[in-house]
Image (tube, helix red, strand yellow):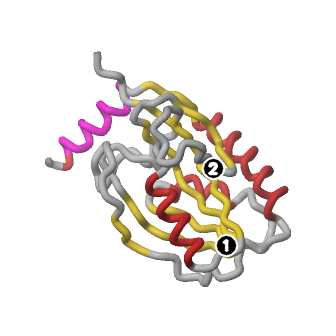
Amino acid sequence: MSENNVKDVVEKVLNSADCLYTREQVEKTIETMASQIESQLSDDNPVVLTIMNGGLVFAGQLLTHLNFPLVVDYCHATRYRGETSGGELHWKALPQVSLTDRNVLVVDDILDEGHTLLAILNAIKAQGAKQVYTAVLVEKVHDRKAEAEFKADFTGMKVEDRYVFGYGMDYKEYLRNAPGIYALKEEK
């Protein structure tokens, strides 16, 4: 696909999508989440572990609101690999900071079915983390969770069961930088 064609396709997807949450709504949600996280973890000197690439935008904004000592690291695992539905888990990078006897806050863009996040949490626990918390910007509401009762410790907003993008979530590797949370139009 040529560069001009990519631009046209991406612009068409964004312009035809439904805006579920505006930039202002997302930013307010992140501030609220930061306050909740601070009240829970401010005395723990936690490792804040961002899941790449999706968690990058959310984590970057969240970190600026966390006013306590913390260490930042990342890991990269994906099931999507540029597609709009998930497959097998593929590890690209593991955390570099020792997680042994540390409280860890895992930051990700979305909790959909939870397969990726659960696999990452299991890997972190296997590295000896004392306590593991999760923060997701978006939770998709449906009954297909990897584990029936699985929920993040800190959740920003909920969305219906549609393909969403923006604020780190992608559409075929594009639109992670969209200034809000958007959903593809439902096909009729």
Residue farthest toward the top in the current orientation of the protein:
188
Q: In which image quadrant can residue 61 be found?
A: bottom right
Residue 145 x %, y %: 49, 42
Disc 1 versus disc 2: distance between alpha carbons?
17 Å
Residue 14 in magenta stretch: yes
- Left or right, 161 with respect to 157, comes to left
Element under label 2?
loop
What amino acid type should be assigned to the residue bearing mark 1? Val
Residue farthest toward the front in the current orientation of the protein:
148
Could you tell me which quadrant the C terminus lies in? top left
Magenta region:
4-16
Element under label 1?
strand
Position of 16 relative to 33 (above/below) = above
* Residue in front for this viewpoint, 26 or 137: 137
* Residue in front for this viewpoint, 21 or 126: 126
Q: Write the residue at 64% across / 36% down.
A: 24
What amino acid type should be assigned to the residue bearing mark 2? Ala
* Residue in front for this viewpoint, 131 or 43: 131
Residue 152 badge: 2
Q: Write the residue at 70% across / 40% down.
A: 28
Residue 142 x %, y %: 49, 32
Residue 63 x %, y %: 67, 61
Q: Write the residue at 37% across / 69% down.
A: 91
Using a 10 Å C-alpha cutoff, classify the residue at mark 2 as few (fewer than 14 neighbours), some (14 to 19) or many (20 or more). Answer: many
- Which mark sits nearer the N-terminus, 1 or 2? 1
Position of 40 relative to 103 (above/below) = above
Which tag is nearer the camera, tag 1 or tag 2? 2
Mark 1, residue position: 47
Residue 177 badge: none
- Left or right, 67 with respect to 162, comes to right
